Amino acid sequence: MEGEGDDCHGWCEVVRRGHPPVRRTFSVADAKRVRLWGKTGANGPTPWVTYPARMLMSRARGFAIRDAFADALRGVITVEEAADMPPEPRDVPNLAAAQAPTAAVPAVVVPVPPTSAVADAAGDAAPGNDNEVLDWLRDERDQGAAVESVEGLFVEALGADAVTG
């Protein structure tokens, strides 16, 4: 431990063979910033109240080890850090979605055509069977299925005249 007041900090220096030493600190100011300093839990005081110096050193140790041995640890955190995680998931707003256009996009239900219709559409059957696919699409549309987007694919494959009707 070094320093006084908010500048008081725990530190840890880790040496990995073939690499320069890695030294990390965690201060009282850091603990206050992330609301750990003086933290109490459902069962009373946490180690941040009962053993604050140890917790500062523990956080510094976790940072130093993760920074020096990130490839070996693969994101593993210390027990103390895991204990400080919020007990419930937080509702974090998706800022990217808030900036996206707000135009409503209708849900599209695409029915699966009969196997023979798929084969016909792919050109695997006799050319005269294109009408079977179109009839199936029209029947689905007439029954309320949203097949307009599927018909658009057939316009490309068969031509606009074949799809109308």
Image: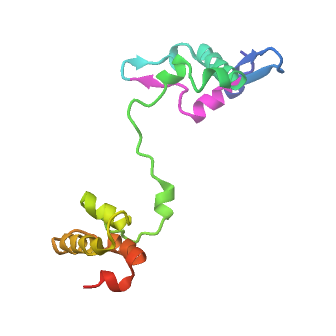
| Relative horizontal placement of residue 117, taking residue 63 as reference (left or right) | left
The spot of residue 13 in percent (x, y) is 76, 16
The residue positioned 28% from the left and 70% from the top of the image is 147
The residue positioned 42% from the left and 69% from the top of the image is 102
Q: Look at the image and name its color scheme.
A: rainbow
Image quadrant where residue 139 sits: bottom left
The spot of residue 5 in percent (x, y) is 68, 24
Residue situated in front as seen by the camera: 3 or 54:
54
| Relative horizontal placement of residue 25, taking residue 102 as reference (left or right) | right
The spot of residue 129 in percent (x, y) is 28, 71
Residue situated in front as seen by the camera: 16 or 138:
138
Total marks shown come to 0
Q: For the N terminus, give its image quadrant.
A: top right
- Specify whether residue 73 is in view: yes
Task: Give the residues in magenta.
Answer: 25-41
User: Magenta stretch: residue 32 in it?
Assistant: yes
Using the image, determine if residue 29 lies above or below residue 132: above
User: Magenta stretch: residue 61 in it?
Assistant: no
